[in-house]
Amino acid sequence: MQLNDATILGRLSAVENTAGSITALGSWWCLHAFSGAAIANAWAALITHAKTDSQRRTALLMSCHEVVLSCLQLRASLDKAVLSLIRPIARLFPDALSKSVEVAERQQAAAASDVEDVKAFVASVEQVMHWWTSAKVFPPDVTGRVLSATAEYHKRHDAKATSAPPAPAPSTATSAIDGNVVAPVKRFLVAYNKFVAAKERYQAAQVRTTDGGEDSADAKDALTRRLLRLRKVITGRDEDAADANDDSESETTPGDDSLSAFVDAELLALGHKSETTNDASAPPVTAAFSDPLSGLFD
């Protein structure tokens, strides 16, 4: 099922320049891999739009970076879902980001956007391009097209312009590359992968044990544990993450409410009442397994 344009534009327009919002949009993008081309087209249109402010433009950039990171971790598989995400981004980002730098510069000249916000956006573009190049996600000649646009910006606005891009200014968005945003996405991917594997073992055990014997019961218990673990990661109550960084606040859901609803339905199908679902509001349970990530993280 393809998402309609209004839904996509509404979700992209709602992103804010915070770690939680960027992570949520990136995960939502991956969740709807089957609409990857439509989402990428809307992303390119919004990030280059004259009325998009530089903070939202930075958030859109970093959300795209989240999707690229997810695809990079699964580059070896190159399944259809991964390709449906990465190909539209590869096709659109050179022109979209180059144009977005030019649009942000015009906003700066017209005092339509805060100068520091524009500088932070340009710095974020440079950092992401250098990261993609060093990680060999995209070739240097492609990322270089974007860096040429940022270099032109510096020539016109920096008192002491040099050929090398300046060190990016600290910001909420650029910290994503340092792991503040990437970490919860990785935890989500690990938990989800383990859930999918447990689900496959449970389904295989049901086929082998038609009378619901011990093999099926063990697989069911294992699947329930994986679902409960996945729910903790989604809701930001992951004990392992908290122990790893006691000084930081718990990260929020690396996705949207559809993931929580999916976990609730799976738990109910196994006869386990979820923490957030009561009998009156429980979603209908279907016998067939419907993967909400369309095989992206299999």
Image (spheres, helix red, strand yellow):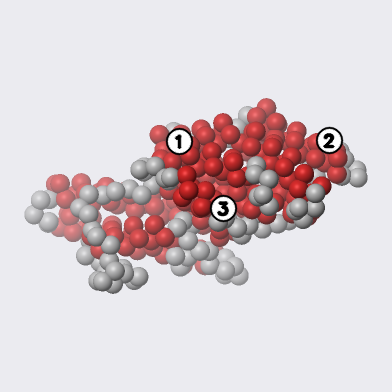
Q: Mark 2: which secondary structure?
A: loop
Q: Nearer the viewer, residue 184 or 7?
A: 7
Name the residue carrying label 2: 163
Q: Nearer the viewer, mark 3 or mark 1?
A: 3
Whichever of callouts 3 and 2 sits on the residue coming sooner in the sequence is 3
Mark closer to the observer (2, 1): 1
Q: Is residue 84 left or right of residue 265?
A: right
Cα distance between the residues tagged 3 and 2: 34 Å
Q: Is residue 16 above or below residue 298?
A: below
Residue at 57% x, 69% y is 249
Who is closer to the viewer here, 57 or 169?
Answer: 57
Disc 2 and disc 1: Cα gap in Å? Answer: 36 Å
Q: Residue at x 12, y 50 (%)?
A: 209
Give percent across and percent down for residue 90: 56, 33
Three-letter code, disc 3: Ser
Structural crowding at the residue carrying mark 2, measured as other residues with C-alpha within 10 Å and reported as few (<14), some (14–19) or many (≥20)? few
Q: Amino acid at mark 1?
A: Ser
The answer to which quarter of the image holds residue 2 is top left
**Percent position (x, y) of residue 27?**
48, 51
User: Which residue was labeled with disc 3?
Assistant: 13
User: What is the crowding at mark 1: few (fewer than 14 residues within 10 Å), some, or many (at least 20)?
Assistant: some
Q: CA distance from mark 3 to mark 1?
A: 22 Å
Q: Which dot marks residue 84?
A: 1
Which sits earlier in the primary sequence, circle 2 or circle 1? 1
Front label number (3 vs 2): 3
Q: Is residue 123 visible?
A: no
**Farthest-out residue, right:** 159
Depth check: 21 or 141 in front? 21
Task: Work out whether 114 lies above or below 247.
Answer: above
